[in-house]
């Protein structure tokens, strides 16, 4: 199935793109997606934590992705 991945903040720089279209397994969970993402883009392992949103709602690791989902990778934000 196809999903769209949006990158924000430092993740855009690490991956070298602001979005990607990916072909993934039909029964992929958010946790499985995180593992897949780190395999395809090992430079993301340097980020200690980041949030995942699916279709503009924060998602838990157990959520199973569906065809056409839009997944946002949201890194930690700091300010000063």
Image: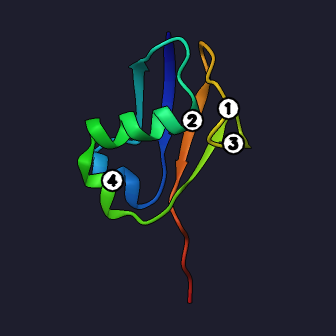
Q: Are marks 1 and 2 in contact (CB under 8 Å)?
A: yes
Q: CA distance from mark 1 to mark 4?
A: 21 Å
Residue 21 figure quarter: top left
Q: Nearer the viewer, mark 2 or mark 4?
A: 2
- What residue is disc 3 on? 59
Q: Residues within 10 Å of mark 2 (few under 14, many from 20)?
A: many
Q: Is residue 49 left or right of residue 18?
A: right
* N-terminal-most mark, 3 or 4: 4
The residue to which callout 2 is attached is 30
Disc with the residue nearer the chain's start (2 vs 3):
2
Of mark 2 and mark 4, the one earlier in the sequence is: 2
- Image mark for residue 44: 4
Separation of marks 1 and 3 at Cα, in angstroms: 7 Å
**How far separated are the C-alphas under marks 2 and 4?**
16 Å
Alpha carbon distance from label 1 to label 2: 6 Å
Secondary structure beneath disc 3?
A: loop
Mark 1, mark 4: which one is toward the viewer? 1
């Amino acid at each position: 199935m196809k999903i769209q991945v949006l990158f924000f903040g430092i993740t855009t720089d690490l991956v070298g793109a602001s979005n990607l279209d990916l072909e993934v397994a039909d029964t992929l969970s958010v946790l499985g997606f995180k593992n897949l993402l780190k395999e395809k883009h090992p430079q993301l392992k340097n980020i200690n934590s980041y949030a995942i949103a699916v279709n503009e709602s924060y998602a838990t690791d157990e959520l199973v992705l569906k065809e056409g989902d839009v997944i946002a990778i949201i890194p930690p934000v700091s300010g000063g």
